[in-house]
Amino acid sequence: MKTLPLPLGFSAAGISAGIKKKKKKDMALIVSDVPAVSAAVFTTNQIKAAPVKWGIHVVEHDGARAIVMNSGNANACTGPQGYANTQAMAAHTARNLGVEPTGVFVCSTGTIGKPLPMDKIDAGIDALFKELSPKHGFDAVEAMMTTDLAPKSLSVDIEIDGKPVRITGLAKGSGMIEPNMATMLAFILTDANVEKHALQCALRSAADTSFNRISVDGDQSTNDSVIALANGMAGNEMLTPSSKDWNFFFQTLEKMLFELAMMIVKDGEGATRVVTVRVIGAGSNGEANEAARAVANSMLNKTAWAGTRPNWGRIMDAVGYSHAQVQENRVDITYDTLLAVRGGMAMDVPEEELVKIVSKDAFTIHINLNLGGGEAVVYTCNCTEDYVRINVE
């Protein structure tokens, strides 16, 4: 039986409540024994699911105690009743804990446009409380999964202010993944004592270099949420940016989020290769980002990578239609360490050498626009026939 070590004072559960068509775990609960400081980053999609709207409200309050979530139904585009159902999930969970509903985050993931089966949700919440245990973290991870082929979690033990501290991350995501948050949920739990504003700034900054740097299919979700809870039970002095251990804590958090983000890319729907697109020499970081995203999200590129074809002309094309300033005769393209294009024209490189690179499980495409100091990176994957099969079911 797989386990996931949770920080001190946290318990979790994951069960099958009958929300999914197949009998799989589809509800999870995470509870802190004491009120926790919370921080969150949500989707930037203008269409936000009911639980995201509720979460934006909850994170403004102090003393979060729980996260309750369901998979198999996104509770998005469900109108006033959808929001009422989210509030009901929070209230039901809160009653079991003896706290206000604003102490409970709610997350949903799955199909858009269908009302939640509240009879199953209510029974599921009661069942989750019966299964709560510090040893059931992995059950919660499994309950988060939708089209994921692999569970995504990790736990790290560090020392802060001379006290042992644990940070645990749980995540889900496989399709509808695009930078600026994606169809993904991530819960970051720690027993560290962290000041609320500092935790929010740290989470947002870490998300910008991890979850906001990945793309599977260029589709941005209505439900993405990254929620962090810090309950302070490790007993360290409150962490702020001026604390001597702050940088260590932040770097650990940043590394964890990056590892979770890369798990999502590797598990992209139908993906068989991870591709890093790195752009330098742009007029600004923003322009580098535009160019990198254009290449990473191009279906022409993603299908070429699936067919182990380098086809650098498609990369040039994507860079050209991006919003970045580009001068054709200055563009260089390198596959890993092999320069394929210089000044916008092909180098005398054997095709089989490029094919060998794009046939690997992971490779990097370096694009130098040679116009300035802007740079950016996006982590993406190829697109195979399996992506279509998964998304027509």
Image (cartoon, grey):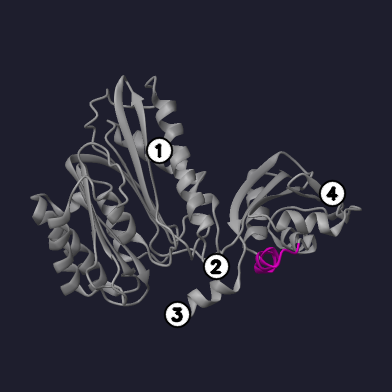
Whole-number angstrom distance, CA of label 4 to CA of label 3: 45 Å
The foreground one among 249 and 105 is: 249
User: Pointer 2: what residue?
Assistant: 270
Asked which secondary structure carries label 3, the reply is: loop
Bin the neighbour count of mark 1 within 10 Å (Cα to Cα): few under 14, some 14-19, many 20 and up: some
Q: Earlier in the sequence, mark 3 or mark 2?
A: 2
Q: Which x, y percent locates residue 53?
A: 31, 60
Q: How far apart are the two marked residues, 3 and 2, measured between alpha carbons?
A: 13 Å
* Residue ranking furthest to the right: 348
Tell me the residue that label 3 is attached to: 393
Q: Give the range drawn in magenta.
A: 299-309
Q: Mark 4 points at which residue?
A: 330
Mark nearest the camera among 4 and 2 is: 2
Upstream in sequence: badge 2 or badge 1: 1
Q: Residues within 10 Å of mark 3 (few under 14, many from 20)?
A: few
Q: Residues within 10 Å of mark 4 (few under 14, many from 20)?
A: some
In the rendered structure, which amino acid carries the disc numbered 2?
Gly
Q: Earlier in the sequence, mark 4 or mark 3?
A: 4
